[in-house]
């Protein structure tokens, strides 16, 4: 496997120092802890990653979302990734990168990568595509682990502002977009995953038909988390889409009031734990 200096740019080869320099910026960012790095990867290496990025529409078993909240493509079959894309995912799941995330985020619980890339992997959005503002599922679907960190890497060259597709970070009340991050080539975004980290790109992509918004997504977990990071541990472990205040016909919100009440019952929790431990983990 290539050494990290082949993957990282010279400016970022000492990740320990980068974490030390940027930890306070991460913690104090608004509307929730996050940071954006530009040109963190070796330019030639990331060019190779981009050149090997497949057309996800043409892959038979890619995930194809076509609903009011999501019009996008994703693919997480690591074993089928091209060589350089595998190298990058190997690095991002390595002890070196995990320690960097641990140090820059200040998370006390030990961070773990997800070799299954649940919800992650390769993401692609074509013209007209959308990802409404949401908070992510907060637990691993198979293991007793809490989702703590999102890492997004963008691969889009010559991306024009008129195309849209900015990653938008919204406040807790969904009243204001606090920050917009253009999805341009060699930009990496790290942010804390809680029930309050509202994000997405809620307006349809306006790029030409021959251009798409390409990104890599990785999620990191821990055993246990601060209780104030989630609203209700008994709510269904799912992505929660949210409408922006002042926008009509925005996200399709699924409140599930009755189901959430049932999930608060101990008998329901017992059977869900049994199902997760003995049935779902064996699939």
Image (cartoon, helix red, strand yellow):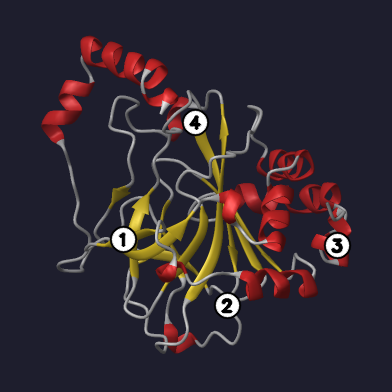
Q: What residue is disc 4 on?
A: 146
Q: Secondary structure at mark 2?
A: loop
Q: Which numbered disc, 4 or 3, marks the residue that appears first in the sequence?
A: 3
Kindly identify which residue carries mark 2.
156
Mark earlier in primary sequence (1, 2): 1
Up-down relation of residue 190 to residue 49 (above or below) = above
**Along the line of sight, which residue is nearer the eye, 258 or 198?**
258
Q: Identify the residue at horizontal 30%, vertical 24% (top origin).
A: 234
Cα separation, mark 1 vs mark 3, equals: 35 Å
Q: CA distance from mark 2 to mark 3?
A: 21 Å
The residue tagged 1 is: 65
Q: Is residue 7 above or below residue 184?
A: above
In this image, 275 relative to 45: left or right? left
The residue located at (76%, 65%) in the rendering is 41
| Image quadrant where one finds the C terminus | top left
Which of pointers 4 and 2 lies earlier in the amino acid sequence? 4
Disc 4 crowd rating (10 Å Cα; few below 14, some 14-19, many 20+) is: many
Which mark is drawn over residue 280? none
Disc 4 + disc 1, Cβ < 8 Å? no
State which mark lies toward you, 4 or 3. 3
Q: Nearer the viewer, mark 4 or mark 1?
A: 1
Categorize mark 2 by other alpha carbons within 10 Å: few (<14), some (14-19), many (20+): some
Residue 6: mark: 3
Cα separation, mark 4 vs mark 1, equals: 25 Å
| Residue at the far left in the pictured view | 258
Q: CA distance from mark 1 to mark 2?
A: 21 Å
Mark 1 residue crowding within 10 angstroms, few (<14) / some (14–19) / many (20+): some
Mark 1 vs mark 2, foreground winner is 1
Give the mark, 2 or 3, whose residue is nearer the N terminus. 3
Query: Measured along the vertical axis of the image, is residue 249 above or below residue 239?
Result: below
Q: Earlier in the sequence, mark 1 or mark 3?
A: 3
């Amino acid at each position: 496997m290539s050494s990290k200096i082949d993957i990282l740019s010279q400016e970022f080869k000492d990740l320990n120092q980068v974490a030390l320099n940027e930890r306070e910026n991460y913690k104090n960012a608004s509307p929730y802890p996050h940071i954006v790095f530009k040109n963190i990867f070796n330019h030639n290496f990331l060019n190779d990653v981009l050149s090997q990025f497949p057309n996800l529409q043409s892959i038979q078993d890619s995930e194809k979302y076509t609903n009011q909240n999501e019009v996008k493509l994703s693919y997480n079959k690591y074993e089928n990734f091209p060589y350089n894309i595998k190298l990058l995912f190997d690095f991002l799941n390595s002890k070196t990168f995990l320690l960097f995330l641990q140090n820059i985020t200040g998370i006390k619980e030990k961070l773990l990568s997800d070799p299954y890339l649940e919800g992650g992997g390769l993401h692609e959005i074509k013209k007209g595509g959308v990802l409404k503002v949401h908070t992510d599922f907060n637990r691993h679907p198979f293991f007793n682990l809490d989702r703590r960190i999102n890492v997004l890497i963008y691969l889009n060259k010559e991306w024009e502002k008129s195309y849209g597709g900015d990653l938008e970070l919204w406040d807790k009340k969904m009243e204001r977009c606090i920050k917009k991050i253009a999805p341009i080539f060699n930009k990496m975004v790290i942010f804390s995953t809680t029930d309050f980290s509202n994000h997405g790109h809620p307006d349809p992509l306006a790029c030409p038909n021959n251009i798409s918004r390409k990104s890599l997504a990785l999620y990191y977990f821990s055993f246990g988390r601060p209780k104030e990071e989630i609203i209700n541990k008994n709510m269904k472990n799912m992505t929660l889409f949210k409408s922006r205040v002042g926008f009509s016909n925005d996200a399709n919100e699924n409140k599930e009031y009755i189901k959430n009440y049932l999930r608060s019952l101990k008998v329901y929790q017992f059977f869900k734990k049994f199902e997760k431990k003995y049935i779902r983990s064996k699939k």
